[in-house]
Image (cartoon, coloured by chain):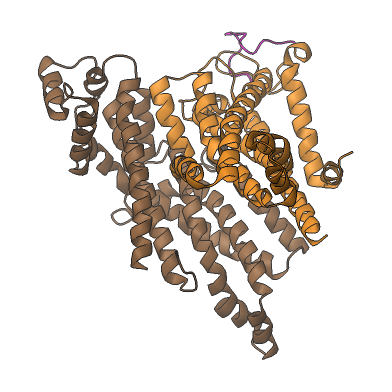
Chain colours: A brown, B orange
């Protein structure tokens, strides 16, 4: 187990290093000088001198990368060109909003996805199964940003129940405002997530239901509810955990897009705004941050999977 | 007719999807002959008009006909998807072919590179690349195309690995046929089916990714009509012109659903055929 974790770490770190090298090299690929990309056109000579000295921009490229990486590991991602604030502060301010959206969407995804999968899998190829599978295909096929627009048209423009643009309120300090603002974005992203959950869980449940132990459990007179709830569900959840890993990449894309639809002040919108004004330190910081979270979570999912499924020997 | 194609056409959902894609591709290709209007023609006296006999889906904020723009948007979308899938395939398939056929250090190096690419969320990679290259149709196409490489490489490699040990491949090797000859005339033609499924699936991914990038305002720059950009602009007029964002959303969604249905049906048919071959 320990050696598996170490090996998995040994895979993740080079990926992060190569990606960070690419992110650093961005400023060399954009038109103009790398210093210009990092401090902007309106920088004072003092600012240019400070950044040049901090990152050693007069040194060889690999030295520059190394210094930049060390600074990043130290939490110093540089200064935003636009408002001269530290990049890490700007990112930190947006994290609670994105986390709240992500968790709410996951919750909706599970609440909708699991019942749909169970109902489908218990009667495969029945009318109900076909309707529910169609629903999953729709949840996966309808682009998140269009679904968001449709929900705004219905709940904000037509019914005036919910705001069309979502601000961030913490669920702990202002639960009512938080729910009103979070409802539409969380539903938009959550319906997509429910499609992924239900499709994979249905497949896993159907193949588990054919297993010998299910026949044994049924033949000894266990109620169907116990067979499914206590035995099948646990085994079907195992391969399901890996889906979470696969889901993460799409989840990041979904969050970026959902935040844009609802002008929700999360991390994704920060990145998009940064690209819009070519604020390279902020772009680099956001991408590096999101990527680090993504790779770390993938790593955790793999380790968790190895931990909960002792049958699998990782060599 | 090819039996897999015949069975594909016998599947109702797939048939509908194919019919939709054919109509979409045809209208997109011949839009300039079918449609009277110019997608860029502005009419500032008639901005944000609701649907009428003259403008079936209304006009946008510059008085341009929304239906004309949605159809020309299909052209943009399909060209981007075609270009992106070509880039992904032309680079990805040879990588998978070489990695799977030779194995060893070539496999290790190539697949590590593919793994790195696979480890990055496509949209993030595309946005980073566009932040560097600047916003253009070519940049979107290249960015989306590169995110398709790992998919093609992995599926090709898996297919080649299973063909590698078959008699007709080892026979050519034993008779002294060159590796290149063996790879391209022997292995690759037999590895086509799953690659074809990838073409369909990745086209859908490419169209969606391009639309998402344009929606985020980092994809294809205006005034080129694109569905993502129409949705982005339409979102600004939800109260004044609620129909604005509806049509581009419908055509985009139908495109994605069609390609997904075709892709899923195809992969099931190929699986069935392969398991039948394995038994037979």
Q: Residue B81 at x, y = what percent?
A: 62, 28
Magenta stretch holds residue B48? yes
Quarter of the image with the C terminus of chain B is bottom right
* Relative to A5, A281 lies left or right: left
Q: Which residue sits at x=18%, y=17%?
A: A43
Quadrant for residue A209, please give it: bottom right
Which residue is farthest front?
Answer: B175
Q: Quadrant of the N terminus of chain B?
A: top right
Left/right placement of residue B150 relative to residue B156 reads left
Q: Which residues are magenta?
A: B36-49
Residue A176 visible, this orientation: no
Magenta region includes residue A194? no
Magenta: main secondary structure: loop
Q: Please provide percent x and percent y for residue B4.
A: 82, 45
Does the image show residue B241?
Answer: yes
Q: B53 or A51: which is nearer to us?
A: A51
């Amino acid at each position: 187990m320990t050696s598996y974790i170490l090996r998995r770490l040994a895979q993740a770190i080079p990926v992060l290093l190569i990606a960070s090298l690419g992110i650093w090299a961005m400023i060399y690929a954009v038109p103009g000088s790398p210093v210009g990309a990092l401090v902007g056109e309106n920088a004072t000579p003092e600012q240019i001198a400070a950044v040049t000295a901090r990152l050693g921009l007069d040194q060889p490229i690999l030295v520059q990368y190394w210094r930049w990486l060390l600074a990043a590991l130290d939490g110093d991602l540089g200064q935003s060109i636009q408002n001269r604030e530290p990049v890490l502060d700007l990112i930190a301010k947006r994290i609670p909003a994105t986390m709240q959206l992500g968790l709410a969407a996951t919750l909706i995804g599970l609440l909708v996805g699991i019942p749909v999968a169970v109902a489908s899998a218990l009667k495969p190829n029945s009318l109900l199964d076909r309707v529910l599978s169609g629903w999953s295909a729709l949840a996966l096929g309808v682009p998140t940003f269009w679904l968001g627009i449709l929900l705004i048209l219905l709940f904000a423009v037509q019914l005036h129940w919910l705001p069309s643009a979502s601000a961030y309120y913490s669920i702990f300090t202002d639960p009512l405002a938080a729910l009103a603002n979070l409802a539409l974005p969380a539903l938009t992203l959550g319906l997509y997530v429910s499609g992924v959950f239900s499709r994979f869980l249905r497949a896993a449940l159907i193949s588990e239901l054919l297993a010998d132990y299910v026949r044994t459990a049924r033949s000894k007179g266990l109620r169907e509810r116990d067979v499914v709830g206590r035995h099948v569900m646990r085994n079907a959840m195992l391969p399901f955990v890996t889906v979470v890993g696969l889901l993460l990449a799409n989840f990041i894309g979904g969050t970026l897009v959902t935040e844009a639809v609802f002008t929700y002040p999360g991390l994704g919108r920060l990145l998009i705004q940064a690209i819009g004004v070519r604020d390279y330190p902020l772009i680099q910081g956001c991408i590096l941050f999101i990527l680090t979270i993504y790779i770390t979570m993938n790593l955790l999912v793999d380790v968790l999977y190895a931990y909960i499924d002792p049958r699998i020997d990782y060599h | 007719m090819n039996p897999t194609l015949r069975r594909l056409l016998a599947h109702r959902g797939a048939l509908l999807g194919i019919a939709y894609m054919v109509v979409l591709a045809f209208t997109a290709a011949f839009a300039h002959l079918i449609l009277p209007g110019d997608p860029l023609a502005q009419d500032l006296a008639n901005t944000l008009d609701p649907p009428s006999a003259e403008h079936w889906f209304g006009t946008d904020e510059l008085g341009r006909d929304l239906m004309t723009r949605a159809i020309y948007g299909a052209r943009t979308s399909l060209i981007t998807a075609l270009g992106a899938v070509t880039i992904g395939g032309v680079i990805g398939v040879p990588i998978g072919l070489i990695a799977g056929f030779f194995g060893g250090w070539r496999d290790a190096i190539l697949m590590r590179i593919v793994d790195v690419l696979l480890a990055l969320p496509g949209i993030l990679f595309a946005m980073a690349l566009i932040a560097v290259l600047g916003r253009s149709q070519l940049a979107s196409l290249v960015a989306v195309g590169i995110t398709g490489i790992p998919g093609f490489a992995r599926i090709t490699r898996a297919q080649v690995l299973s063909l590698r040990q078959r008699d007709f491949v080892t026979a050519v090797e034993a008779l002294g046929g060159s590796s290149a000859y063996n790879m391209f005339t022997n292995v690759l033609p037999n590895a086509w089916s799953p690659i074809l499924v990838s073409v369909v699936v990745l086209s859908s991914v490419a169209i969606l990714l391009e639309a998402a990038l344009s929606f985020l305002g980092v994809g294809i720059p205006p005034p080129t009509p694109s569905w993502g950009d129409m949705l982005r602009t339409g979102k600004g007029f939800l109260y004044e012109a609620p129909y604005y964002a509806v049509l581009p959303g419908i055509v985009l969604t139908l495109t994605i659903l069609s390609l997904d249905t075709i892709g899923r049906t195809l992969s099931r048919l190929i699986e069935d055929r392969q398991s039948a071959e394995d038994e037979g």
